[in-house]
Image: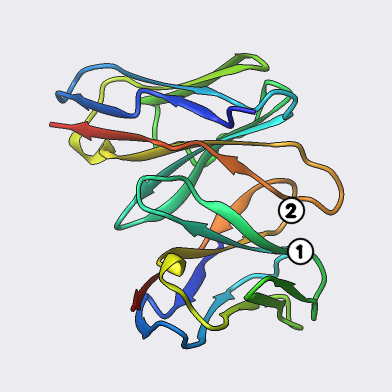
Amino acid sequence: DAGVIQSPRHEVTEMGQEVTLRCKPISGHDYLFWYRQTMMRGLELLIYFNNNVPIDDSGMPEDRFSAKMPNASFSTLKIQPSEPRDSAVYFCASSLIRVGTDTQYFGPGTRLTVL
Amino acid sequence: GQQLNQSPQSMFIQEGEDVSMNCTSSSIFNTWLWYKQDPGEGPVLLIALYKAGELTSNGRLTAQFGITRKDSFLNISASIPSDVGIYFCAGRGGYQKVTFGTGTKLQVIP
């Protein structure tokens, strides 16, 4: 199994530009999570989906952020317009939640730099 | 929102020494999780705890779910250089939303 796949691995953009981060979860997993990691705030949950449906987006910082999961094998996190304070590592994780198991498998992350 | 305080923030230890780190919460959790993150990678689950008082081992790692359900600790025995990384605790109160601690950065001196 290839694990969770994220693209791009690195993104450098200018303030005001639209940024789209992509994630392919592990096949068969029914939960998908988007996290943001910064030195100041650590790992923060932004949003998560169950069977492609957004369940909790209370961690999404503001309206500039949006996430979609059009099918079980693909999700996007979009920032429009981007700002320097959005610079962070964004992780996607997926899991197959069953009683007694909590393993979320994380992707390698996308390091975003907004100039 | 829920806060997870993890300590220490960083540690330098000699190879072969034991390590202990802990996590406290302002709220009760139903599940405690411990992750390790290597540079340039995503976190990887080390141990999951599901019951108050539970003590679980994974090789040289041992973790406990506190009786009050507001704390947990992780011990690493006989540290080796590949233990270097950032260790995160995480708690799950309900549904699938997980709150992460601030991390403990571990450096092992050979």
Label 2 neighbourhood size at 10 Å, few (<14), some (14-19), many (20+)?
Answer: few
Label 1 neighbourhood size at 10 Å, few (<14), some (14-19), many (20+)?
Answer: some
Question: In the structure shown, which secondary structural element does the residue marked by tag 2 occupy?
Answer: loop
Q: Quadrant of residue A16?
A: top left
Residue lying at 58% horizontally and 73% vertically, measured from the top left? B25
Q: Can you give x and y, in whole percent of width and height, for residue A33 in the image?
A: 58, 36
Q: Can you give x and y, in whole percent of width and height, for residue B59 in the image?
A: 67, 71
Mark 2 falls within which chain?
B
Q: Is circle 2 on the same chain as circle 1?
A: yes
Asked if residue A90 is positioned above or below residue B43 in the image, the reply reads above
Left or right of A111 on screen, residue B3 = right
Quadrant the N terminus of chain A occupies: top right
Q: Which residue is mark 1?
A: B30
Q: Which residue is mark 2?
A: B94
Q: Amino acid at mark 2?
A: Gly
Mark 1 falls within which chain?
B
Q: Can you give x and y, in whole percent of width and height, for residue B4 in the image?
A: 52, 68
Looking at the image, which residue sits at the far front?
Answer: B110
- Front position in the image: B29 or A37: A37
Q: Amino acid at mark 1?
A: Asn
> Counting residues from the N terminus, which is met first, the one under dot 2 or under dot 1?
1
Q: Can you give x and y, in whole percent of width and height, for residue A67 in the image?
A: 50, 23
Asked if residue B44 is positioned above or below residue A64 in the image, the reply reads below
Tell me if residue B102 can be seen: no
